Amino acid sequence: MGTMFSEGEKRCIILFGAPGSGKGTQARMLLNRVHISTGFLLRRRGYDLSTAKLVSDEVVNQLVVEAIESVPYDVILDGYPRTAAQAEFIRDYLCANHIDTIVIELAVRDDDMLVGRLLRRNEGRPDDIESVIRERLEIYKRDTKPALNVLWPTFELWIVDASLHEEYVHKAITRCLEGRPYLEYCPACYGDDIAKEVCAHVCDHRKVREKK
């Protein structure tokens, strides 16, 4: 079975998920692609992310476009878009530049699991303390989660259960990129709060691909 992307063209994978869902880990496990982390780009430019407040959309959009255009290879967006406005911008940019795109949400429904992961990684970052982490999770739910409804249905959307071991999650993402669902069921059907129409969209694709 072929991949979900056209051959010979620059492609984009948007890894979508809450802080601690494993976006950075999974991006590094996907080989032969350029990992674009907005957190890294912003820290390199001297922005202080410890307050858990979002940097302006204009600044982030510019950094991401510069990063995409600086390489001829496939790219992975990690931590972007974070707002509906950013999602509208990158959707329009990717479409205008004919960059094939797929969105993969790394879904973890347990906030305590996310907090625990971020505390255990012990990178010494000032934004990795519990109070800031929980504030970041609330910002994600309020400002970032709705961006999914901007990206879909323009781009293909798959939902991966990221509460599992990272190797299993990696295998799941790989199968999604190959156009093959990795589960007997759709994760959106068992408790995730994603919109019902997105759940139906994912399930329809699962059923179609099971018949092939």
Image: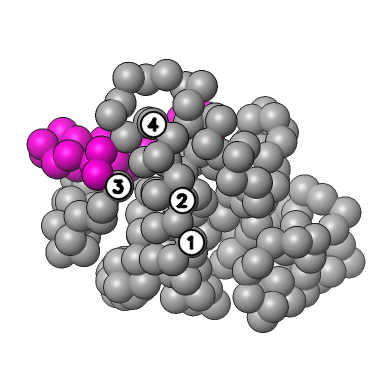
Label 4 and label 3: CA atoms lie apart by 11 Å
Indicate which disc, 4 or 3, sits on the residue closer to the N terminus: 3
Question: Do callouts 2 and 1 mark residues in contact (Cβ within 8 Å)?
Answer: yes
- Residue that appears at 56% across and 54% down: 104
Callout 4 crowding tier (Cα within 10 Å): few <14, some 14–19, many ≥20: some
Indicate which disc, 2 or 4, sits on the residue closer to the N terminus: 4
The magenta span reads 24-51
Question: Image quadrant of residue 99?
Answer: bottom left
Above/below status of 143 relative to 47? below
Query: Residue beneath label 4, please?
Result: 129
Q: Which mark is residue 52?
A: 3
Label 2 and label 4: CA atoms lie apart by 12 Å
- Magenta stretch: includes residue 26: yes
- Image side of residue 109 versus residue 105, left or right: right
**Element at label 2:** helix
Nearer mark to the viewer, of 2 and 4: 4
Question: Do callouts 2 and 4 mark residues in contact (Cβ within 8 Å)?
Answer: no
Indicate which disc, 3 or 2, sits on the residue closer to the N terminus: 3
Q: Residue furthest bottom?
A: 197
Residue 84's x, y, as percent? 36, 72
Query: Which residue type does callout 2 highlight?
Result: Leu
Residue 190's x, y, as percent? 80, 61
Label 4 and label 1: CA atoms lie apart by 19 Å
Query: Residue beneath label 2, please?
Result: 137
